[in-house]
Image: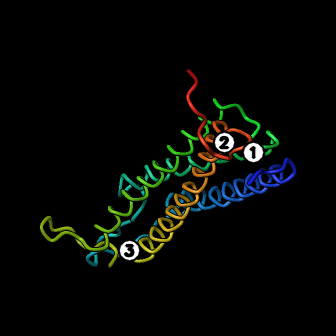
Amino acid sequence: MRLTKGNENCNEDVILKVEILLRIVSIVALVITSCLVALDTETELVFGVLHRKATVKDLDVLGILVIVEAVAAGYNFIQLLRCFFITTSFKTSPKLAWLCFLLDQIAAYVSFATNSAAAQASLLAITGANVFQWLKLCNIYTRFCFQIGGSLFCGFLASLLMAGISSISAFNLFRHYSSKDHFLVFLPRRK
């Protein structure tokens, strides 16, 4: 099947609109994750005598999560500007396509890894560790834990969206290596 020039431009526009939509939704999810984690605090009376405040500083990985999600949101915003100012992502050079592909991959993987580490630390706060005599902190700070859980859900959603963006970047990259007649078919090696 051969694509006509008009049909090809229509496909390019649709893919660009999908990329813009995914970037906007991922930016919103990343900002929500960062804000929920950074601003989450709860003060409770522990053991009947001590006022203890749960904050993001209690788990180091939550502080790292805030930073990573904010950087990923900033990166996606910059890429969103690129989508608007370069009229179509298919007219970019192969070097820019490689750069976008690699940076999208890094953003998606680092965001997913940080969310996974925060989920693992949060699970320890839910279950406790009797061997180390660590209490189940979510029995004491329930609102704090629910808010962290919601933010982790948003973070994993953003990671999935960035994986979709990475697949679009891969499509944009490998399109440079296809001939016009055979869509996404690798060209033979030149001797």
- Numbered disc 3: secondary structure: loop
Q: Single out the mark in the foreground, 2 or 3.
A: 2
Q: Residues within 10 Å of mark 1 (few under 14, many from 20)?
A: some
**Vertical side of 27 occupied by 94: above or below:** above
What residue lies at 54% left-to-right and 57% top-to-bottom?
A: 34
Q: Nearer the viewer, residue 172 or 54?
A: 172
Q: Mark 3 is on which residue type?
A: Tyr
Task: Describe the element under mark 2 as helix, strand or loop.
Answer: helix
Q: Position of residue 7 (x, y in %)?
A: 83, 54
The residue tagged 3 is: 141
The residue under label 2 is: 175
Query: Relative to residue 189, is residue 139 drawn left or right?
Result: left
Report the Cα–Cα distance between label 1 and label 2.
Answer: 17 Å
Tell me which colouring the rendered structure shows.
rainbow
Q: What residue is pinned by disc 1? A: 83
88 vs 22, nearest the viewer:
88
Instruction: Give the label on residue 145, or none.
Output: none
Judged from the image, the secondary structure of the residue bearing numbered disc 1 is helix
Give the amino acid at mark 1.
Answer: Cys
Q: Quadrant of the C terminus?
A: top right
Disc 2 marks a residue whose amino acid type is: Arg
Residue 66 spot, x, y in % from top left: 49, 52
Q: Which of 53 and 50 is in front in this view?
A: 53
